[in-house]
Amino acid sequence: MTVYVDDMRASYGRMVMCHMIADTEDELHAMGEAIGVARRWHQKPGTPRSHYDIALSKRARAVLLGALEITWRQTGAMTARRGVVGDLGSPDEAIAWQRAFVAERRATASVGGHDAD
């Protein structure tokens, strides 16, 4: 079980934000509480894309408490994987999984399109 913080840098007023995701909702909320993020800031609850947008100061605290640093591309690929497979999977394999999944969908759609001719 793991919590992850990505390297996205999005401006939100005077703050700069990134994403925090976790293998489970319980872990996500426990880390949110530990770093001082209010539960009301939980984004997309109950979905594969469940996460918090957190300020860089909160990100630094999460890393000190054991969160793993990943890229924003890995965050996207991992949450996409969770929507298909049911779990985030490994950050190291996230991009490769996503590419293979998209390629398989395109190949299947292409074959389906030719059958309709």
Image (spheres, rainbow, N blue to C red):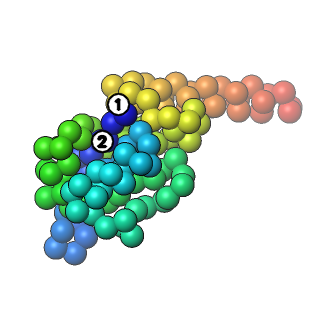
Residue ID for mark 2: 4
Asked where in the image residue 66 lies, by quadrant, the reply is top left
Q: Kindly state the secondary structure of the residue where label 2 is placed.
A: strand
**In the rendered view, would you say 101 is above or below 23?**
above
Element class at badge 1 = helix
Depth check, mark 1 against mark 2: the one in front is 2
Task: Tell me whether circle 1 and circle 2 mark residues in contact (CB < 8 Å).
Answer: yes
Q: Which mark is residue 112?
A: none
Amino acid at circle 1: Pro
Residue located at (45% from left, 35% from top): 88
Residue 116, position in %: x, y?
Answer: 86, 33
Question: In percent of the image, x 78 and y 30: which residue is there?
Answer: 112
What crowding class fits label 1: few (fewer than 14 Cα within 10 Å), some (14-19), or many (20 or more)? some
14 sits to left or right of 52 = left
Given the image, on which type of amino acid does mark 2 rest?
A: Tyr
Q: CA distance from mark 1 to mark 2?
A: 9 Å
Q: Residue at x 15, y 51 (%)?
A: 61
Q: Position of residue 22 (x, y in %)?
A: 37, 43
Against 21, residue 37 (above or below) is below
The residue located at (86%, 32%) in the rendering is: 117
Name the residue beneath numbered marker 1. Answer: 91
Vertical relation: 35 (above or below) 3: below
Viewer-proximal residue among 16 and 51: 51
